[in-house]
Image (cartoon, rainbow, N blue to C red):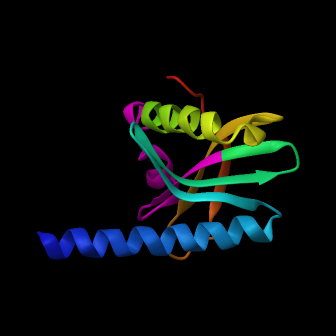
């Protein structure tokens, strides 16, 4: 079981790195990676222009399954963690904030879904 968890953790880190570089290529700037708060974790916090995006990175066999993997419960935890982040980095709150997903799957380009879910679901 520990081996499976370690393998899963490694795959998650690799996916986050791939998503990070994909978004950097699109002009996004990293504010935080694996931001942990008492209420949840955010994979990537990035900014481009006047938009701060709290990004969940998901890896599944298909892009659709990756998008479906973000549950309402998970969205609430990400939203709570985003509030915590903004309380500590108010400059990130200037402009618009949104919640995105980057879906990764084998043999597909990363798929960036903007405004994938609303905060405080």
Estimate the x, y position of residue 61 in percent, counting from the top left.
Answer: 41, 65
Residue 50 position within the rendered picture, expressed as x and y whole percent measured from the top left: 86, 43
Q: Residue 51 vs residue 115: left or right?
A: right
- Image vertical order of residue 24 relative to residue 84, above or below: below
- Outermost residue, left side: 1
Q: Nearer the viewer, residue 107 or 35?
A: 35
Residue 66: x, y in percent? 46, 54
* Left or right of 46 on screen, residue 38: left
**Residue 3's image quarter?**
bottom left
Start-end of magenta stretch: 54-74
Asked if the magenta segment contains residue 58, the reply would be yes
Which image quadrant is residue 85 in?
top right
Residue 65 is covered by the magenta coloring: yes
Residue at screen point 28% across, 76% down = 7
- In-front residue for pair 70/84: 84
In this rendering, would 14 be left or right of 17? left
């Amino acid at each position: 079981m520990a081996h499976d968890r370690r393998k899963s953790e490694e795959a998650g880190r690799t996916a986050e790195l791939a998503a990070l570089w994909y978004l950097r290529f699109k002009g996004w700037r990293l504010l935080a990676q694996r931001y942990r708060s008492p209420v949840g974790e955010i994979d990537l916090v990035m900014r481009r222009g006047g938009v701060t995006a709290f990004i969940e990175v998901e890896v599944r066999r298909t892009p659709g399954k990756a998008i479906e993997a973000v549950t309402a419960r998970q969205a609430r935890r990400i939203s709570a963690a985003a509030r915590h982040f903004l309380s500590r980095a108010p400059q990130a709150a200037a402009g618009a904030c949104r919640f995105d997903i980057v879906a990764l799957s084998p043999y597909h380009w990363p798929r960036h879904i903007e405004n994938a879910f609303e905060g405080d679901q």
